[in-house]
Image (spheres, helix red, strand yellow):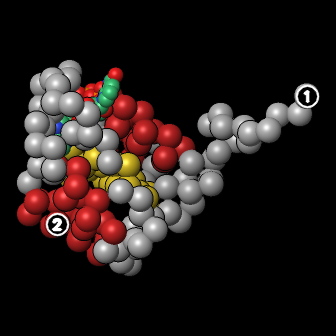
Amino acid sequence: MAQSNPPLDSQHTKGRFSNKVCIITGGASGIGRATVNRFVNDGASVAAFDVNEAAGKHLQDELTAAGYNVKFYKVNVADKEQCVQAVKNVAEEHGGKINYLVNNAGIGAPCKGKFGTESSNPRGSDYIASVTREYSPSTLP
Ligand SMILES: NC(=O)c1ccc[n+]([C@@H]2O[C@H](COP(=O)([O-])OP(=O)(O)OC[C@H]3O[C@@H](n4cnc5c(N)ncnc54)[C@H](O)[C@@H]3O)[C@@H](O)[C@H]2O)c1
């Protein structure tokens, strides 16, 4: 029987996000880090937002050395002003364009992850979504 879905392994998806800009919150570790890896593999320029500066810088250094376009931003997604400023900075660096948002940090029930920094503010992910939408009408919440 013919396969109905397109192949999604990382070799087949290389380049599908070329010239696309993506913000990934909580990008320094866990699911967010894995998502950063996949988006850069697929050709996107990634802005990784996270409160963990050490892990974020490590991520940026490692992936930049591998030839990918990644920039770490220290952002607490529960802080509205930080969200607004960081999204503006990303937009300015990319000609006013943000294509995708992966709103990963603080989306679940308050919990302590590996770094114990999970936000318990349920509105944290809303700030990023609302301000990012200004730069990309098609960005999903
Ligand atoms: N792992 C699971 O099984 C699971 C299941 C359901 C939901 N989730 C949700 O998925 C998300 C990621 O989970 P994970 O397992 O990768 O967690 P994780 O703890 O491994 O990673 C979370 C990342 O988000 C960062 N972060 C935490 N609070 C932040 C804040 N206020 N601002 C910016 N960055 C912040 C952390 O520094 C860390 O790098 C979480 O929101 C979690 O609640 C995870």
| Picture layout, residue 41 above or below residue 89 | above
Residue 56 can be seen, yes or no: no
Q: Foreground residue, 113 or 73?
A: 113
Residue 94 in the image: x percent, y percent?
38, 72
- Residue most extreme to the right: 1
| Picture layout, residue 33 above or below residue 44 | above
| Picture layout, residue 111 above or below residue 89 | above
Left/right placement of residue 47 relative to residue 123 reads right
Q: Which residue is mark 2?
A: 84
Quadrant in the picture for residue 109? top left
Disc number lying in front (2 or 1): 1
Q: Quadrant of the C terminus?
A: bottom left
Q: Spatial distance from mark 2 to mark 1, Cα to Cα?
A: 49 Å
Q: Which residue is mark 1?
A: 1
Residue 124 in the image: x percent, y percent?
16, 49
- What secondary structure is marked by label 1? loop
Q: Residue at x 57, y 48 (%)?
A: 42
Quadrant in the picture for residue 108? top left
Residue 129 in the image: x percent, y percent?
28, 59
Residue 12 in the image: x percent, y percent?
70, 41
Q: Residues within 10 Å of mark 2 (few under 14, many from 20)?
A: some
Amino acid type, residue under disc 1 in the picture: Met
Q: Mark 2 and mark 1 in contact? Answer it, CB < 8 Å.
A: no
Q: Residue at x 74, y 42 (%)?
A: 6
Which of disc 1 and disc 2 is earlier in sequence?
1
